[in-house]
Amino acid sequence: MELEQEKEINPWEIEKFTSEDNPDGLLEVSTFSVIFPKYREKYLQSIWGKVTQSLKAVKINCELDLIHGTMSVSTTEKTYDPYIILKARDMIKLLSRSMPYEQAVKILEDGMACEIIQIGKMVKNKERFVKRRQRLIGPRSQTLKALELLTNCYILVQGNTVSVMGDYKGLKQVQRVVEDCMNNIHPVYHIQELMIKRELAKDPSLQNENWDRYLPHFQKRNLKRKEKKKKKKIEKKDYSPFPPPQLPRKIDLQMESGEYFLSEKQKKNIEMEKKAQKKKQISEEKRRKFNQIFVPPKEEDFSNQSQSPSQKNSNPISKKKIDKIKNGFNKNFRQNINANSQQKQKNEINNYLIQVPQQDDLKQPLKKPKKSKSKQNSKSKSKQNSNSNSKQNSNSNSKQNSNSKQNLNSKQNSNSKWNIENL
C-alpha cells in the first residue's frame, strides 16, 4: 500500500499555499504601481469593479488613479501568501498592455507566468519593423493561433511589445520565435519544428534519444540586393556675415563685351560666323576619324629582341631522333635516286614522241586560215591591181617553198634518229 501511494505522488506538482501555512501574515506593506496609456482609461473604468473583487479574494488592495494615469496594488494585514503580490503586479501590467480582463485574471492561478517582450528596439528601420511584426501576426492572425496551440500560451501583439502568458516552457519557446522573427527568420520554420517535437514527445521510446536527426535544418541565404545610390555630400561653405554679392544682369554682360552697342545686322553676322566655325570643326573631326582607317598600325621591331633561353628550348628535338633521320636518309639515298632517274627518262621519251610529227602528217599540205568577208571586200580592188605583179612572183615563190619543205623533213628525220640511238 505504501508503494502505491508513493507512485501517485508527483514531486513536480506545486502545492497550494493556504492561510494555515502563514497564520501571522506579513510584517510590512509592499506596493507596486504601473502606468497605463490614455486610450485604456474607459476600459479600465468599466472593469475596475471586477478587478477589485478578484484581488479581495486574495487579500490585496488595488487603486485606480485617472489623474496621474496609474494603477497600484498593495498588501494588507490579512495577506498570507508572499508571492501573490507579484502575481497582482503582473496582472496590472497585462491590463496596461491591452490584454482583456478575462485573460489577465488567469495569472493569479498557480503554474501560470507571463512575460512582456520588447520588440521596438530590435529593428531600427520603422518600415522593416512593421513588416516583421506583421509577419509574426500572419494573415488573419493564423501564425499566432498556430503558436498558441503548439505552446499552450496566450500571445498578444500590441505596439512595441508582445505580451505572453502561459507555462514556463511555452514562454521560452514563444520568446525564441519572436526574437528570431525580428532578426529576419520566418516563424513558419519554428512552427514546423514544434509540430515535429510534439509528435516525437508522444513516443515513449524516443524520450532518452537525440531528436536532431528528425528536426529540419535550414540554412540562411544572404541574397544580393541592389546597392543604394550614395547621396553626394554638399560641401559647406565658410560662414560669412555679409550677404552674397549681387549677380550681374544679362544687359551688363552685353555691355562689357560690346554686344549691346551692335546693330541687328552685325549681331546676325557674328552668329553666322560662329555657326560656320562650328561646322568647320565638325567636318574636320569627321575627316580625321575617316582618315584614321587608312593609317597602318605600328609593327613591332623583332630585330633587337633577343630570344630568351626558355623560348629557344621551347620545342627541343632530341639527338636520337636527328641521328635516326640521318642514317635512314644515307641508306636509302642511292635507291631513291635510281628510282627517280628511271622515271624521269621514261617521261622524257614519251613527251618527245608526242611532240615529233609523223611522216604522213608532213606530206599533207598546210591549210591557209580563212579571211573575213569585210577584209575580202576591202582588198578585192587591191588584188585586181596586184594580179599582174603576183603572177610574175608566184613561180619564184613556189620553187623556194618546195626547197624549204624538203630541208625541214630531212632535218627532223635526222634529229629523231640521233635521239633514239642515244637512248
Image (cartoon, helix red, strand yellow):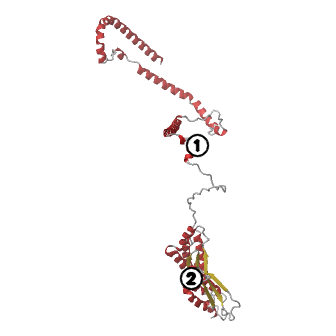
| Residue furthest to the front | 261
Left or right: 174 as drawn, with respect to 28: left
Query: Circle 1 — which element?
Result: helix
From the top left corner, tell me how far across and down residue 27 is, in percent: 71, 91
Q: On the image, numbered disc 1 is attached to which residue? A: 256
Identify the amino acid type marked 1.
Glu
Residue 157 visible at all: yes
Q: Nearer the viewer, residue 72 or 354?
A: 72
Q: Nearer the viewer, residue 124 or 357?
A: 124
Please tell me how crowded label 1 is: few (under 14), some (14-19), or many (20+) other residues with Cα within 10 Å. Answer: few
Query: Circle 2 — which element?
Result: helix
Q: Earlier in the sequence, mark 2 or mark 1?
A: 2
| Residue furthest to the right | 27
Tag of residue 283: none
User: Which label lies toward us, 2 or 1?
Assistant: 1
From the top left corner, tell me how far across and down residue 266 is, in percent: 50, 38
Residue lying at 58% horizontally and 76% vertically, measured from the top left: 162
Q: Nearer the viewer, residue 43 or 267?
A: 267
From the top left corner, tell me how far across and down residue 344 is, in percent: 49, 25
From the top left corner, tell me how far across and down residue 342 is, in percent: 49, 25
> Could you give the CA–CA distance between mark 2 and mark 1, rounded to whole angstroms?
77 Å
Residue 112 visible at all: no
Q: Nearer the viewer, residue 64 or 22?
A: 64
Q: Which image quarter is the N terminus in?
A: bottom right
Residue lying at 66% horizontally and 86% vertically, measured from the top left: 31
Residue lying at 38% horizontally and 17% vertically, measured from the top left: 358
Identify the amino acid type marked 2.
Glu
Please tell me how crowded label 2 is: few (under 14), some (14-19), or many (20+) other residues with Cα within 10 Å. Answer: some
Tag of residue 41: 2
Residue 393 found in image quarter: top left
